[in-house]
Image (tube, rainbow, N blue to C red):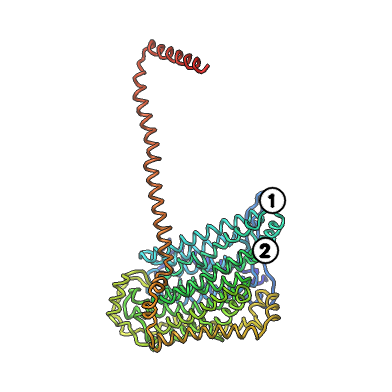
């Protein structure tokens, strides 16, 4: 009987088969399939669930000490060149498989409640299954070329899901923005993959790393060229994992339904970039310039995301910039040569960030009962407050997520983020300072979100605030079909149904406990991914080094929480107004997202339109002018020459004689 690892190819195939079956049904029998909402949903949930069971079996084998499994076949051959495809399962892949399938199943169960009244319910579940399949295929890919295929499938699915409500300008624009920005990164990735193949003759991860070092040592390529090729490949993760300056698509992706926001931010698209950088550590590690670049970009990203999150009033966008910041921490770990720490933070972050996003969806779903299906009102925290007494499950799980991401022990975020800060302290002390400060900012803005949403008095019926928000922002994209009838609006929100509450409760458990698998003195997670590194960490562990750094991290997080309590729970200070009045330029800078969207709009959007108009002018005046002139010359010459067609032999002889005389004169002059 084949082992679970040998059957790992079924993990992406099962969701793909379900998505293809339902998709073909939608194309062929649209009305009939759309009526089978629940059967279709549970069919696709079962497909992803079966993939999850198989993923757990693969992970159990890895935990038991099984080695990597790789199954390859020749996909294309030409002479001595063989291009191989197949699948690969190792400890890193097993962790990702279990993570992706777990989050995907929970998001799909949640979506059954959240999207229950949406007319695109069946289409949404089909996209979710296809998205999950694409990410799972990426995880088990054995080489860069196969990864690139699934990489593009992940991008296509994100485009479909972000623009799910394509009839709205906000959603359509956000999907296009995500698509275009990711194409920039993917173009660099493709150039890097082709360049590395030119330099090494291989698409395999370990082979590329070894052959690239040999090529540099042998002088066949320079160190600078190798660094450029590595950085071109890194452009792909920069876009997918929303690293500065290619992060701008991720906050706008909130125009999609909240369940897909949870899946993108926790376990699929943004995780793909971090996973690829971890896979490519054998390639990146020998080149210090590449590692430093990754670490610096990660540090800029983590600070940028946290600083912008400080001013956000939209609940989902506040969480989106939080994701940008946490992805920066993961990239900082990769740049410090600590992929295990980066992957550990990816795993812990996936659970509490999925819980936070699903919690925000529960809040928005409840707010729509009060304010109607207008996203400007349903997602703005200025109309929330006091929801804890109406939504106990959502508020409790959201609070757990806030404590976890703030880095308070013993919850998961403390162990993973503190490990990254410890690695940064040893490798790049200046970058550690930025990460340390950002830890305090993270605690502050997350508890700001919590207090504005769940504590104080409920402000959902404040017509003055609602009118002000509508006047300032207008109508835009959001989380439900605006064409649906609102019906009678409730006086206050209610807790969500079991389909939405159960995934929150399930995700709360790993958000609290999973960090204990990565305690630095006995890291089971590190032993699974890299036993040699785990042994080295345990051997060099010192309480004298750990306690001061961990204590400082907890202290600054506690200070951030304390400031949020004073400003938003106790209302001792109106911090937002105070900062805006004292530092208007800084407040405007953060509120306008570092002006990066404005810069991109001016340089690339308007710039490309101006270039297109200039090209159009050249085309119409120069190219068309040359063509028209050629036509006029032909017409004019034809009109003139027609008078020489007389039909008289004497006239033709005269022309020939004249031509001969002209040639004699010409040759005489030249001679």
Give the mark nearest the N terminus, 1 or 2: 1
Q: Position of residue 427 (x, y in %)?
A: 63, 73
Q: Position of residue 217 (x, y in %)?
A: 71, 58
Residue 600 visible in the shown view: yes
Mark 2 secondary-structure assignment: helix
For the residues bearing labels 1 and 2, Cβ distance under 8 angstroms: no
Distance, label 1 to label 2, CA atoms, is 20 Å
Q: Which mark is residue 215?
A: none
Nearer mark to the viewer, of 1 and 2: 2
Where in the figure is residue 431, as x and y percent of width and height? 57, 73
**Quarter residue 56 falls in:** bottom right
| Left-right relation of 456 to 436 | left
Name the residue nearer the viewer: 491 or 241: 241
Residue 50 in view (yes/no): no
User: What residue sits right under mark 2 in the picture?
Assistant: 206
Quadrant position of residue 160:
bottom left
Percent position of residue 671, x then y = 53, 16
**Relative height, residue 650 to residue 514 (above, below):** above
**Element type at mark 1:** loop
- Toward the top, the furthest residue is 650
Q: Residue at x 41, y 47 (%)?
A: 615
Quarter placement of the N terminus = bottom right
**286 with respect to 153 (left or right):** right
Vertical arrangement, residue 463 with respect to residue 73, above or below = below
Q: Residues within 10 Å of mark 2 (few under 14, many from 20)?
A: some
Q: Nearer the viewer, residue 614 or 16?
A: 614
Nearest the camera: 634 or 536?
A: 536
Q: Which residue is mark 1?
A: 80
Q: Is residue 138 left or right of residue 583?
A: right
Query: As displayed, is residue 418 above or below residue 299?
Result: below
């Amino acid at each position: 009987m084949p082992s679970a690892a040998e059957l790992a190819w079924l993990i992406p195939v099962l969701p793909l088969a379900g998505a293809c079956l339902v998709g073909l049904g939608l194309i062929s029998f649209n009305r009939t399939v759309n009526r089978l909402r629940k059967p279709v949903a549970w069919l696709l949930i079962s497909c992803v669930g079966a993939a999850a069971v198989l993923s757990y079996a693969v992970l159990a084998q890895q935990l038991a000490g099984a080695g990597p499994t790789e199954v390859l076949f020749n996909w294309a051959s030409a002479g001595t060149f063989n291009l191989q495809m197949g699948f690969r399962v190792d400890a890193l892949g097993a962790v990702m498989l279990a993570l992706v399938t777990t989050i995907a199943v929970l998001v799909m169960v949640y979506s059954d409640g959240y999207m229950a009244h949406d007319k695109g319910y069946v289409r949404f579940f089909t996209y979710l299954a296809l998205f999950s399949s694409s990410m799972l295929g990426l995880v088990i890919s054995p080489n860069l070329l196969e990864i690139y295929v699934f990489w593009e499938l992940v991008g296509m699915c994100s485009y479909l899901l972000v623009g799910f409500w394509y009839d709205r300008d906000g959603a359509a624009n956000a999907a296009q923005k995500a698509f275009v920005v990711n194409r920039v990164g993917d173009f660099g990735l493709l150039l890097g993959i082709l360049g590395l193949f030119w330099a090494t003759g291989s698409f395999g991860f370990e082979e590329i790393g070894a052959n690239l070092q040999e090529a540099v040592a042998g002088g066949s390529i320079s160190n600078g060229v190798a660094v450029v090729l590595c950085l071109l490949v890194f452009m792909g993760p920069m876009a997918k994992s929303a690293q500065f300056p290619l992060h701008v698509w991720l906050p706008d992706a909130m125009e999609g339904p909240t369940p897909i926001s949870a899946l993108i931010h926790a376990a699929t698209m943004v995780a793909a970039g971090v996973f690829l950088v971890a896979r490519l550590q054998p390639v990146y590690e020998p080149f210090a310039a590449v590692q430093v670049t990754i670490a610096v970009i990660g540090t800029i990203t983590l600070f940028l995301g946290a600083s912008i999150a400080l001013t956000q009033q939209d609940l989902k966008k506040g969480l989106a910039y939080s994701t940008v910041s946490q992805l920066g921490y993961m990239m900082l770990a990769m740049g410090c040569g600590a992929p295990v720490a980066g992957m550990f933070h990816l795993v812990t972050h996936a659970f509490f960030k999925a819980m936070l996003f699903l919690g925000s969806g529960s809040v928005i779903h409840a707010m729509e009962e009060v304010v109607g299906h207008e996203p400007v009102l349903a997602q703005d925290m200025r109309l929330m407050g006091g929801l804890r007494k109406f939504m106990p499950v959502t508020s409790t799980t959201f609070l757990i997520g806030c404590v976890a991401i703030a880095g308070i022990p013993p919850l998961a975020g403390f162990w993973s983020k503190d490990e990254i800060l410890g690695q940064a302290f040893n490798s790049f002390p200046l970058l550690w300072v930025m990460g340390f400060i950002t830890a305090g900012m993270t605690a502050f803005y997350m508890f700001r979100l919590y207090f504005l949403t769940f504590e104080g008095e409920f402000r959902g019926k404040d017509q003055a605030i609602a009118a002000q928000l509508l006047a300032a922002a207008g109508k835009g994209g959001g989380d439900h079909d605006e064409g649906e009838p609102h019906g009678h609006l409730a006086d206050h929100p209610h807790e969500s149904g079991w389909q939405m509450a159960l995934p929150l409760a399930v995700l709360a458990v790993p958000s609290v406990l999973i960090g204990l698998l990565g305690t630095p003195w006995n890291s089971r997670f590190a032993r699974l991914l890299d036993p040699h590194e785990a042994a080295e960490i345990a051997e060099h562990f010192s309480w004298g080094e750990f306690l001061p750094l961990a204590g400082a991290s907890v202290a600054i997080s506690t200070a951030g929480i304390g400031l949020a309590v004073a400003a938003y729970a106790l209302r001792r200070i109106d911090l937002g107004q105070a900062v805006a009045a004292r530092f208007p330029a800084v407040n405007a800078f953060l509120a306008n997202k570092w002006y990066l969207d404005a810069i991109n709009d001016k340089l690339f959007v308007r710039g490309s339109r101006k270039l297109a108009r200039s090209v159009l002018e050249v085309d119409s005046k120069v190219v068309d002018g040359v063509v028209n002139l050629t036509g006029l010359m032909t017409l004019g010459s034809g009109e003139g020459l027609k008078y020489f067609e007389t039909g008289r032999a004497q006239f033709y002889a005269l022309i020939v004689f004249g031509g001969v005389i002209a040639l004699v004169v010409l040759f005489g002059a030249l001679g």
